[in-house]
Image (cartoon, grey):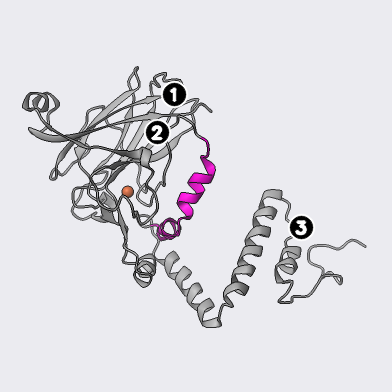
Amino acid sequence: MTTGPQEPDARAELFSEERSAEVVNAAFARTGDPRLRDVLRSLVGHLHDFVKDVELTEDEWNAAIGFLTATGQKCDDRRQEFVLLSDVLGVSMLVETVNHRARGVATESTVLGPFHVVDSPPRPLGADISLTGGGEACLVTGRVTGPDGEPVAGATVDVWQADADGFYDVQRPDTVPPANLRGLFTTEADGTFWFRTVVPRHYPIPDDGPVGALLEATGRHPNRPAHIHFLVLADGYAPVTTHVFAADSPYLDSDAVFGVKPSLVRDFAVVEDPERAARLGLPDHFRTVDFEVVLLRR
Ligand SMILES: [Fe+2]
C-alpha cells in the first residue's frame, strides 16, 4: 500500500526540542520543487536555531507576530513597509550584493527602495522632471555604455528622486502632481542622456510605521543621504538598479538602508555660467552631475 499525502505516516518522528528542525523539514520532504525545498530547509533550520539561541519567550513571539501583522497592514499601493523592513535589516542590500558579485567594470547596483511604486512617464531628453520648481536647479548628464565602452543606443533610463525638501511625489499626493521627479528617458545613438531636475535632499525613510518604531527602539536614525535613483535597461544587456549619491550630503557613512557604495558618489558641481544656463533653460546658478552607466552583456 502506498502512503498518500493525506495519510499519517506511522514512522514519522514526533516533535522534540532537540530535533525540531529535522522533524519540520521531514514534513516538507515531498516538496516537488528542489529549490523551494532547499530554501525551506535552510529557513526552518535558521528559524529554529534562532528561537533556541535567544530562548524566545511567548510574549516576544506574540510581539513579533504583532509587528509583522502591523507591517503588512501598513502596506498599500503607495507604501511598502515590508521593503522598508528588509531595507533597515540590510537584507535588501545583501540580496543585491549576492546577486551582483564580480561585476568588473559594470556600474555597481544598490537597493531599489520603496518609492518605485508608480510608473515613470516617458519624457524627451532634456525634459525638466521637476514639475513644481523650487530648490536648486540641476543638470544631469550621462552615457550608457557596454563593458568595452561601446555606446548603448536606445537604452531605457528610468529615474526617480526626492525633492529639495526630501519627499517623493507619492508622499505628498495632495500637493504634488503625479510623476513629479520621475522620468523614463531613451539614450541617443551615442548612448547619452540628459535631463533637468532639482538637487535632491537627504531624507528620512517613512518612519511613522512599525519600521520607524523599530529604528526608534534601537537608537537608529532613519535618514538616507541625497541620491537620484536609476534603473537602466537595454536589449542584450543585464539591467542595473542603482543610485548616484551627492558627495556633499550628510549620512553618506550611515545610510539607514546600507545602500552607499563609494563608486556611486559624485560631485554635484556648482555652475555659474549664465550663457550656458540660458542655452539649457536653467537659472544662472545651477549644479550638475554626470553619471556614466556601464552595463554587462547578458
Ligand atoms: Fe530614494
Across the whole image, how many numbered discs are drawn on residues?
3
Q: Secondary structure at mark 3?
A: loop
Q: Quadrant of the N terminus?
A: bottom right
Lateral position of residue 174 relative to residue 22, left or right: left
User: Is residue 230 visible in this depiction of the protein?
Assistant: no
Tag nearer the camera, 2 or 1: 1
Q: Residue at x 74, y 66 (%)?
A: 22
Q: Establish if 72 lies above or below 156.
A: below
Q: Nearer the viewer, residue 52 or 152?
A: 52
Per the image, the residue denoted by label 2 is 232
Within 8 Å: ligand 1 and the Cβ of disc 3? no
Q: Looking at the image, do the residues carrying marks 1 and 3 touch, with CB atoms under 8 Å apart?
A: no
Q: Name the front one of labels 1 and 3.
A: 1
- CB of mark 1 near ligand 1 (< 8 Å): no
Which class describes the residues within 10 Å of circle 1: few (<14), some (14-19), or many (20+)? Answer: many
Mark 2 or mark 3, whichever is nearer to me: 2
Which x, y percent locates residue 8?
82, 70
Quadrant housing residue 185: top left
Instruction: Give the image location of residue 109, x and y in percent.
Output: 43, 40
Q: Is residue 60 above or below residue 281?
A: below
State the residue in front, 88 or 134: 88
Residue carrying label 1: 146
Which mark sits nearer the N-terminus, 1 or 3? 3
Q: State whether the magenta stretch is mostly helix, strand or loop.
A: helix
Q: CA distance from mark 2 to mark 3?
A: 40 Å
Q: Residues within 10 Å of mark 2 (few under 14, many from 20)?
A: many
Query: Residue 30 — which label?
Result: 3
Magenta span has 164? no
Identified by mark 3, the residue type is: Arg
Which numbered disc, 2 or 3, marks the residue that appears first in the sequence? 3
Closest to the observer: 225 or 12? 225
Boundaries of the magenta span: 80-102
